Image: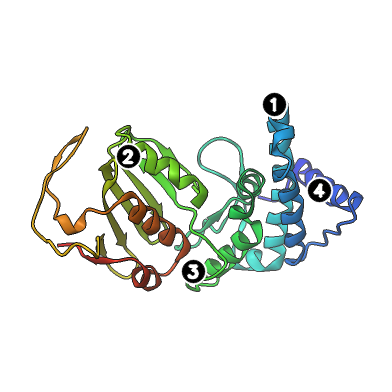
Amino acid sequence: MELNSEFKGLVEYAIQWAGRTGITLDYTRESIRSVDDILLAYHNRLDKFDSDDGKDYLWDVAFAFGIYVGEVMLRSGLAEKGFTWDYDDKGDGIPILSNSEDKNKITASPVTKAHKCIINGEDDIVEFFVDMIFSLANGDKMPKTGVLRVPDVETSSGKIIDKVVLKETDYFIDIVAKGEEDFVIFKSHDGFLQFYGIGDQFICEAWFTLGGRRAYQMINPSCANRERVRLVTPYGEFTPRERGIISREQLEFAVREYFSNLDEADFLEKVPHEDCE
């Protein structure tokens, strides 16, 4: 779809707003760095927008600058690759970019990303997001540096949370450690990382599904025992191999590296593991 008059007005508003602060937005990819500067300035003043009206205002800011970013992406080459404006399939009316006619469908939500940049700060830089979408659109491998995974989350109780950033992962480890959830899965474009456990004992696996299906269990390298032991959680009794039970510290390390390494080999090089049987 073409930008309707309302969205065109929002883009003009974003450009004018930036201009009043001495920032020029000229539809170049370089200008997205300036958008990040604007959004991060709001992030640094989140406490001033703690009311419902304040939160609505921040969403409006993200919406305007997200539409601008989307227009930049289209004008910078995505339109030539078949991308157009569309709406997400969740029925909440958020405009997205999509190459829906391509067999390798890619969707991108610059509006949602702009809002996450305001809320999460440096963990959700828009410029990195734009670089990642262009890499995917060009058929390249995911960029290895400067970009973090932003996987969706699924819990054992059926909760699904879209696009979680690294700083939010402690919460999901907590709810498993406290017995509030049986397991948590971080789902990425190329597979997933999942874990279960209780207290300071966890079982963690990483699955990669691009070019085949490979599964790895995270291990405690200081434990040589491969015999099975009992692991009791509020959700049942399990019999993992002792070597496969890792501490919370080791789990946090594995999760951090999963979010920080977009390449399977890079992740495996840093995290102790063995092939799943």
> Which label sits in the foreground, 4 or 2?
2
> Which label sits in the foreground, 2 or 3?
2
Q: Which residue is mark 4?
A: 14
Q: Few, some or many C-alpha atoms within 10 Å of disc 2 (few <14, some 14-19, many ≥20)? A: many
Of residues 190 and 147, which is closer to you in this image? 147
Q: Which residue is mark 2?
A: 177
Q: How is the image coloured?
A: rainbow
State which tag comes first along the sequence, 4 or 3: 4
At 68% from the left and 32% from the top, the residue drawn is 55
Cα separation between marks 4 and 2? 44 Å
Q: Few, some or many C-alpha atoms within 10 Å of disc 3 (few <14, some 14-19, many ≥20)? A: some
The picture places residue 269, in percent across and down from the top left corner, at 35, 73
Q: Few, some or many C-alpha atoms within 10 Å of disc 1 (few <14, some 14-19, many ≥20)? A: few
In the shown orientation, is residue 203 left or right of residue 102? left
Q: Amino acid at mark 3?
A: Met
Of residues 102 and 277, which is closer to you in this image? 277
State which tag comes first along the sequence, 2 or 3: 3
In the shown orientation, is residue 218 left or right of residue 94? left
Cα separation between marks 1 and 2? 32 Å
Q: Which residue is mark 3?
A: 142
> Which label sits in the foreground, 4 or 1?
1
CB contact under 8 Å: marks 1 and 2: no
The picture places residue 99, in percent across and down from the top left corner, at 55, 59
CB contact under 8 Å: marks 3 and 1: no
Q: Amino acid at mark 2?
A: Ala
Q: Which mark is residue 270?
A: none
Q: Is residue 102 above or below residue 252?
A: below
Query: Helix, strand, or loop for circle 2?
Result: helix
Cα separation between marks 4 and 1? 23 Å
